[in-house]
Amino acid sequence: MPSAPSLLARGPWDAAQVDHSWRDEPFEPGPEAEAEADAAIEALRDRGSPSHDGLSARLKSFEVRGDHLHLELQPARWALRLGGDARDSMTVLCVVRAADGRWLAGRRADWVASWAGRWALGAGGSVEVGEDPVATLSRELEEEWSVEPERLTVEALVRLPSGLVSLVGLARLPEGAEAIPDAEHDAFAWWPPDPGEWPSEAHPPLRRVGQLLVHA
């Protein structure tokens, strides 16, 4: 497993320049990965976190075709993303900037399944089976912060050290937009436009994302 995120493809792309297809057959991870997923779900139950399982997206392959990005997806067990090797389970990260360039950051509540108690940028989550990953960016933004972007671009496709693959979007909010956090966040803040001026709670992975997008 890599020790740092790896950049698979770099945009930016407009929403219309990112397309996708779905394979019918679900991904078969093997008994060892299934057992690890079972244990991870049980651990969520033990700490009172939502532990529903099911199917979500996995990145089967991708291709940059001129000025377009194509994603090939397949159904996979959601809980695979909780193990030591997420097997290319697909997620999205919708980073948010205000009209004046500030970045929206939220601290994840202690009860959530992922990043509990840690600060994160914008909104994120898994891609549902049959869903357009670009639509997932907007859906997660509305569900977590009750805002709609003035402009949404897709900036990068990144593989994380855990084996998760993340489609990174950048949402720019209109002047005067007010972000309202959902129950998955217990605090939020607007960080300065320059990632070098972010507070100490901005751990290194967040700073790398900011640096990647600062000129976007």
Image (tube, grey):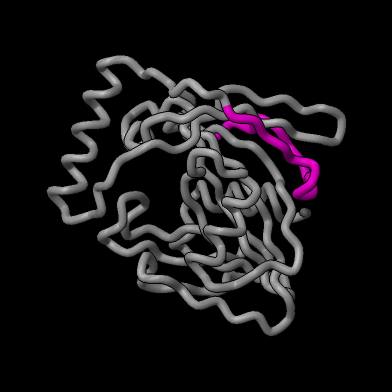
Q: Is residue 142 above or below residue 77?
A: below
Task: Please indicate whether residue 202 sits to the left or right of residue 49 in the image.
Answer: right
Q: Magenta span has 77? A: no
Q: Where is residue 59 in the image (x, y as percent from the top left)?
A: 55, 29
- The residue under the point 59% across, 31% down is 6
Q: Magenta span has 16? A: yes
Task: Please indicate whether residue 191 sits to the left or right of residue 172 in the image.
Answer: left
Residue closer to the observer: 161 or 36 = 36
Residue closer to the observer: 19 or 192 = 19
Q: Where is residue 98 in the image (x, y as percent from the top left)?
A: 68, 72
- The residue under the point 27% across, 61% down is 110
Q: Which image quadrant is residue 141 in?
A: bottom right
In the rendered image, the residue lying farthest to the left is 46
- The residue under the point 62% across, 52% down is 135
Magenta residues span: 5-22
Q: Where is residue 123 in the image (x, y as percent from the top left)?
A: 52, 59
Q: Position of residue 152 (x, y in %)?
A: 72, 58
